[in-house]
Image: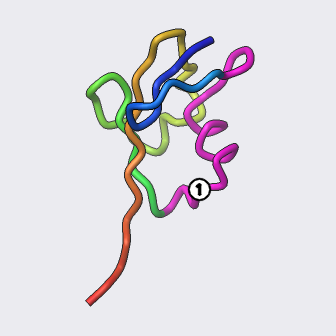
Amino acid sequence: MRIYVNGKETLAAGQMTVAALVAQRGLDQNKVVVEHNLAVVPKEEWSKLVLADGDKLEIVSFVGGG
């Protein structure tokens, strides 16, 4: 299945949830926000939302600084 993450086409094998995608990418789930097809996904929904072919995701990381 093809999905788009931050504008780049990515191949995902089989069914995958948002939570699995975040984990696969080695991201700290406490420091990212995920948008799925133009809607922000609450963190408690990540493990329930199964991605489909053609889905578009934006993953934004928080960065501290001063």
**Numbered label tally:** 1
Judged left or right of residue 31, residue 25 is: right
Q: Nearer the viewer, residue 39 or 57?
A: 57
The residue positioned 40% from the left and 23% from the top of the image is 56
Any magenta on residue 26?
yes
Judged left or right of residue 17, residue 37 is: left
> Based on the displayed image, in which of its 4 quarters is residue 38 positioned?
top left
Q: Is the residue 59 above or below the residue 28 in the image?
A: above
Q: Amino acid at mark 1?
A: Leu
The residue positioned 57% from the left and 15% from the top of the image is 2
Any magenta on residue 31?
no
Q: Is the residue 28 above or below the residue 8 in the image?
A: below
Q: Quadrant of the C terminus?
A: bottom left
Q: Nearer the viewer, residue 6 or 62?
A: 6
Q: Nearer the viewer, residue 51 or 12?
A: 12
Judged left or right of residue 30, residue 57 is: left
Residue lying furthest bottom? 66
User: Where's residue 58, x and y in %?
Assistant: 38, 38
Of helix, strand and loop, which mostly describes the magenta segment? loop
Q: Quadrant of the N terminus?
A: top right
Q: Is the residue 25 above or below the residue 37 in the image?
A: below
Q: Nearer the viewer, residue 48 or 58?
A: 58
The residue positioned 46% from the left and 45% from the top of the image is 43
Judged left or right of residue 10, residue 13 is: right
> Based on the displayed image, in which of its 4 quarters is residue 62 positioned?
bottom left
| Residue range highlighted in magenta | 12-30
Instruction: Report which residue position mark 1 lands on.
Output: 27
Q: Is the residue 19 above or below the residue 54 in the image?
A: below
